[in-house]
Amino acid sequence: MELLKKLEILANAAKYDVSCSSSGSTRKNKAGGIGNSYFGGICHSWSEDGRCISLLKILLTNYCIYNCAYCINRASNDIPRAYFTPDEVAELTINFYRRNYIEGLFLSSAVITSPNHTMELLTETVRKLRTNYNFNGYIHLKAIPGADLELIKEAGKLVDRMSVNIELPSATGLKLLAPQKTQETILKPMAYINSQIQEHREDRKSRRRAPHFIPAGQTTQLIVGATPDNDLNILRLSEKLYQSYQLKRVYYSAYVPVNQHPKLPSISQPPLLREHRLYQADWLLRYYGFKAGELLDESQPNFDPELDPKTDWALRNLHFFPVEINRADYETLLRVPGIGVRSAQRIIRARRVRAVTFENLKQFGVVMKRAQYFITCQGKYEGQTSLEDKLLRQYLIAKPRSSQLLLPRPYEQLSLFTDNSGVVPTEVLMSNLTGEL
Amino acid sequence: MLVYLYDGSFSGLLTVIYESYYRREKPELIIVQDKWEHALFTREVVIKTDEQKADKVYQAILTRISGFAAKNIYCVFLAELPGTERLIYDYLARGWKWGDKLDLHLADEVVLKVQTIARKVRNEAHRMLGLVRFRLLSQELYYAQIEPDYNILQMISPHFARRMADQNWIIHDLKREMAAVYNQTEWFLTPLPRSVSVSLDEAGLAYESLWQKYFSSIAIKSRQNKRLQRNFMPKKYWKHLVEMMEDN
């Protein structure tokens, strides 16, 4: 098969994995070598769906022994299949890299023959790139669940980032849609990678020349909307993953209906707004000091389609407001709707030399449309209405823009499990981590 | 009206700052000599660029204000916007007064303007790290054309010298008719006319088709959002992007 056709097939097969960032590594170029990594990551292009392209994201092969219901590459699907040789992958990577199309390689694979065999093929490919081609650019490699931990360790010494995808946020979802996988096989490599990262990091503290191990850390992906898990379960899971496994990122992927299957919900559009809300909440966890339990609870287990999670939280916690811009600490400023990390930092800096006014806030990038109701400047309140107003919520709901994301489209309801066994309890995968059942 | 004329170089501008200080004069207009047309009722002073004086000013910025301020004025200078000389002058005047607290004065019009322009320049430079597209010419030479809004060529070249260390490359700024040239040891700037003719390597074109194929395959059709794509990658850059050439 010609290379062009292979690339088409194996890029198509890889595109539902959303993670593509190239940040977090400081790998340097070597004498006579090519490539280095850029700590903040670099986007090289943007595809028609608006997602950044920073790595060459391909599968080594899409021949798969598994038959997961949600996956386009499931064994029973009648689709064109192909596989790359390690040299083909290396040549593509190097030649794209030399033209500055990419930051590096994101290599994944369907499971061919066995998890161990697949992991060996993946490792052989990246080893070739590093040693034969002297490539020092960014490499993100998938760890194949079920492969021997020793194999994963070997691969980890060569790459910048590794990820194991959880995909389905609950054990029951996994049983239903991917019966050949178990949560144990997913969590084991994750825990192992984390322990190795911590160990190598300790080593590097005492010996500067100790080898790197996955310097950019590990990530994972959760599919949103293929199972009936609610937002609260998903967010709790993410929180736990950040805490217990020190994950760098959890990616959320709106379920794209690629297969017809009685156990899958039949939706016409991927739930993009829901995915967007989860990303907003994820940022609140990682950079704004929020806890999952503050944003959602049993009485409200899903995000409001009309309000962003922070504004929603603020409306439920009016006693927290108004906040005085010139006195509140950084953590408090971050909790004000309309104030982000950058604008909060600007406020903190600017008020060291002069009191900040409403006029200044606009210049600092504060979204006054939202912030005005929740703040005072030197004791003055300039909100269009007061905090006590019952209609405050109405004031805050964003006017729909013509953008695809904000089209007022309610969540697709997941009432569509056609067989009657479809009432799936939603204990999260995490309950097995914490030991609670 | 007092007008200071200089040669358009960064050192020239720093010399202007030096002379203005020691002559105890405040120019109302600072402008590149070539762009200046004589007008009535003006007193013109031609400032001759002096590297030593420029260096003194630069050191003074580092010690009396901050490294951040020094970087800011360099970025603003590279923006090549009309009136930036006077903006830099006013910014430094505040700097001598406020010292290392200069950039905390975000509410000050001049400080805010300097930071805003500097940020735009840095953003474009960062964007260009991703958007430069090399094409393989015969004789193992990689050649890229860019037309950035700001003069960011010298900001991005060190990155490519570190990264593409084992290949010869040229990044050509068509707008300014300047090129950064790298020969596997060092990079340097040199004038290069817009109309220079190049011959592409035939075999190398295969990878351009492969990239185009990859680019179209990786998009998820049911998530199409071209507006978002344009937000991140404005149309003005498409001309030199291999993957967008068909859409032009």
Image (cartoon, coloured by chain):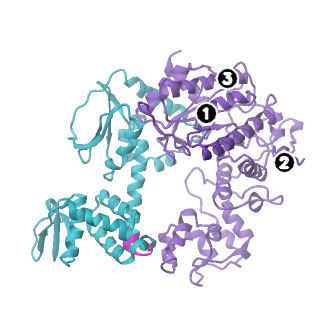
Chain colours: A purple, B cyan
Left or right of B231? Residue A213 is right
- Say yes or no: labels 2 and 1 on the same chain: yes
Q: Give the mark toward the camera: 3 or 1.
A: 1
Q: Work out whether mark 3 precedes mark 1 in sequence or the reverse, and give the earlier one.
A: 3
Q: Secondary structure at mark 1?
A: loop
Q: Quadrant of residue B206?
A: top left
- The local crowd at label 1, few if under 14, some if 14 to 19, many if 20 or more residues have their Cα within 10 Å, is some
Q: Is residue A24 above or below residue A14?
A: below
Q: Is residue B186 magenta?
A: no
Q: Work out whether mark 2 precedes mark 1 in sequence or the reverse, and give the earlier one.
A: 1
Q: Residue type at mark 2? A: Thr
Residue range highlighted in magenta: B105-111
Is residue B119 visible in the rendered image? The answer is yes
Q: Chain of mark 1?
A: A
Q: Secondary structure at mark 3?
A: helix
Q: Chain of mark 2?
A: A
Who's the residue at 41% across and 30% down the image? Answer: A32
Q: Is residue A407 above or below residue A394?
A: above
Q: Give the mark toward the camera: 2 or 1.
A: 1
Residue carrying label 3: A118
- Residue A225 at what x, y percent from top left? 73, 43
Is residue A254 visible in the rendered image? The answer is no
Disc ID at residue A138: none
Q: Secondary structure at mark 2?
A: helix
Left or right of A364? Residue A304 is right
Q: Is residue A325 above or below residue A398?
A: below
Disc ID at residue A157: 1
Residue carrying label 2: A434
- Residue A154 at what x, y percent from top left? 65, 29
Q: Chain of mark 3?
A: A
